[in-house]
Amino acid sequence: MKKYSKLIIAALIALVFIGTFVFLWQKSQPKEVVYQEFTPTQNQVQKTTIITGKIEPRNEVNIKPQISGIITQLLKEPGQYVQQGEVIAKVKVIPDMGQLSSAEARVRLANINLQQAKVDYDRQKKLHDKQLVSADEFEKIRQKLQQAQEELTAAQDALQVVRDGVSKSNASASSTLVRSTISGVILDVPVKVGNSVINSNTFNDGTTIASVANMNDLIFRGNIDETEVGQLVQGMPMKITIGALQDLKFDASLEYISPKATESNGANQFEIKAAVQLSDTSASGNSTLRSGYSANAEIVLAEVQKALTIPESAIEFSGDSTFVYVIKGEGKAKTYLRQPVTTGLSDGVNIEIKKGLTAKDKVRGPEVIADEKEN
């Protein structure tokens, strides 16, 4: 029994040894090299570039108060549409003490002048009734009385404006009412009820009550590298893709190329702007697009129609020259002739062949790897 066990073990060892030898021998044998083969075809070749940027309104207006004070009421919220002249907020005036004192002094002085004008008028009227004063002199006195009355009214209005922000004569155009200067969508209301606000003057820009923009007039703003900016011209068509809206696409037209570069991460970039062409469905109320959406713009920098092309992987680059391997013969008699060619535009996958090949030729591509052979 032990004798048979030894024979079986020896046989197994021999089989393993022979199998290993056969496997190594097969691996050492030269394998047939198989290449992909391509036939030149006529295609449209486009060289495109992708520019990252964002969508924003062409004109965004900051609405600011005409007076300093405290917000007492906000009548609008972000996202609402407002017409030009519509009230957005109300402001309670905090009067400047210097201006208030001057306005009160003006009222007192106007009162004094009016009282004196009335005395002069009454005196001259009595003399005029007795025909002791000419009509011309009496008319001048009456005119001074009217001027004094108007001055008092103007002084009282000025005092009301300084103290309350509104007067009886201009109540409809009160500076305490913050109105929108354009029609559009409210993008932001950065203040709250109770916040102090100041008007714009020579020392500061004033407090922004709301930002309003026309969302039917949008632009794409992005930056392009200096190596590609020279191929751009105003009016070039673009395709704008907004990834946040399930790859929503819009047409656009390039309308601005910055004449000055800005440095970004060590590279010179030029700002561009393009007018976004909204469809009727997206433009109505424009609830789809929002200011600040990230977007990509695709621009066709160059294009060739009906170009003779082959995959760029079949091209051999050697210095400034380009070559392909033209297939000659069939089966085991197949040979590869190294042929110089003149190339043109490339889209990164296919390349234009200007000279050196015809549509009847067949060229060698990359080597077929083992996995590809099995598939």
Image (tube, rainbow, N blue to C red):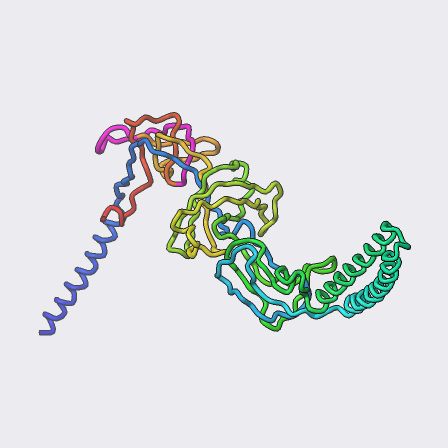
Based on the displayed image, in which of its 4 quarters is residue 176 positioned? bottom right
251 part of magenta stretch: no
Q: Position of residue 7 (x, y in %)?
A: 12, 66
Residue 2, placed above or below residue 135: below
- The residue sitting at 86% across, 56% down in the picture is 128
| Residue furthest right as drawn | 132
Residue 233, placed above or below residue 240: above
Based on the displayed image, in which of its 4 quarters is residue 14 positioned? bottom left
Magenta stretch, overall SS = strand
Number of numbered discs on residues: 0
Q: Which quadrant of the figure contains the N terminus?
A: bottom left
Along the viewing direction, whichever of 27 and 155 lies nearer the viewer: 155
- The residue sitting at 88% across, 54% down in the picture is 131
Along the viewing direction, whichever of 193 and 332 lies nearer the viewer: 193
Q: Position of residue 27 (x, y in %)?
A: 26, 50
- The residue sitting at 56% across, 63% down in the picture is 88
Q: Position of residue 258 (x, y in %)?
A: 59, 42
Residue 29, placed above or below residue 335: below
Along the viewing direction, whichever of 321 and 13 lies nearer the viewer: 321
- In the image, 309: left or right of 125? left
- In the image, 258: left or right of 239? right
Q: Position of residue 281 (x, y in %)?
A: 38, 50
Q: Which span is picked out in magenta?
A: 327-348
| Residue furthest front as drawn | 130
- In the image, 307: left or right of 193? left
| Residue furthest left as drawn | 1
347 part of magenta stretch: yes
Residue 331, placed above or below residue 169: above
